[in-house]
Amino acid sequence: MRISTFLSILLVLVTSESAVSQDDLTRGFQLGIHGGLTSWDIGDIEGNAFDSESGINFGGSVGWGMSDWLGIFARGDFTTISPEDLEGYTVGHLDIGIRGIPQLFGSTVRPYFEVLASVRDMSLIEPNGFEISASGVGFGGGLGLYFFVSGKFAVNAGFTAATGNFDTVSFAGFPVSNDVSATSGRLIAGVTFFP
């Protein structure tokens, strides 16, 4: 498919009029993609001190708007972090939560807030070849903004933070400490489609 054809289809989707009322913009199924920045702070694991580190994230989301102001969602993303003293490693988040979308500024600009549980996972290979992996559940929240370009298409940006402990930590395949604190913050921007 040529780029001009793709852009023409995208333009039709963005500028088409929605059959739903402006109060119902966020009802029903939602599908989104996003990218941004993750900041990550983990306690010591087997002598590895993880300073506050950051990397670029990308991911997607699905949701269901139960009303024009309340919905549920699942969102996943992956971040690659490249610290100076270790090999690069990945951090994954899987969020499940509730999103409130009050209609404060009319129908085009809609702020949102989230309350969520976040399953976090990280895995890295040390210079000596041993793998360290950790996972656990955190709890947090977020704030953001939808800007509706049309009745079915919105540009969104937001910030999400979660904190908790890793309850599963392994070093070279063997379980080790299970009380490692982990806090993350994610700044994301993306697009959401409301079919």
Image (cartoon, helix red, strand yellow):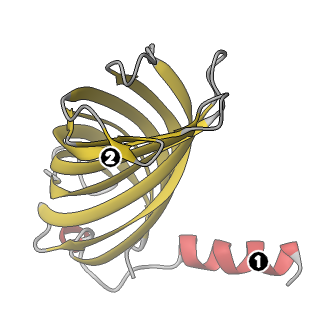
Q: Residue at x 43, y 49 (%)?
A: 173
Q: Nearer the viewer, residue 48 or 32?
A: 48
Mark 1 or 2: in front is 2
Tell me the number on the disc at residue 120.
2
Q: Considering only vertical position in the picture, is 142 above or below 23?
A: above
Q: What residue is disc 1 on?
A: 6
Residue 141 in the image: state x and y as whole percent: 18, 39
Sequence-first tag of 1 and 2: 1
Quadrant occupied by the N terminus: bottom right
Label at residue 102? none
Q: Secondary structure at mark 1?
A: helix
Quarter of the figure with residue 94: bottom left
Q: Residue at x 69, y 81 (%)?
A: 9
Q: Is residue 98 above or below residue 17?
A: above
- Residue found at the far right of this picture: 2
Specify the amino acid type for callout 2: Arg
Whether 19 is drawn above or below 142: the answer is: below
Residue 13 in picture, x, y percent from top left: 57, 77
How many other residues sit within 10 Å of disc 1, few (<14), some (14-19) or many (≥20)? few
Q: Amino acid at mark 1?
A: Phe
**Cα separation between marks 1 and 2:** 35 Å
> Residue 90 location in percent, x, y?
54, 43
Q: Position of residue 68 (x, y in %)?
A: 14, 67
Q: Quadrant of residue 134?
A: top left
Q: Is residue 83 left or right of residue 63?
A: right
> Callout 2: few (<14), some (14-19), or many (20+) C-alpha neighbours within 10 Å?
many
Q: Secondary structure at mark 2?
A: strand
Disc 1, disc 2: CB below 8 Å?
no
Which quarter of the image is occupied by the C terminus?
Answer: bottom left
Q: Is residue 11 above or below residue 75?
A: below
Residue 125: name its quadrant.
Answer: top right
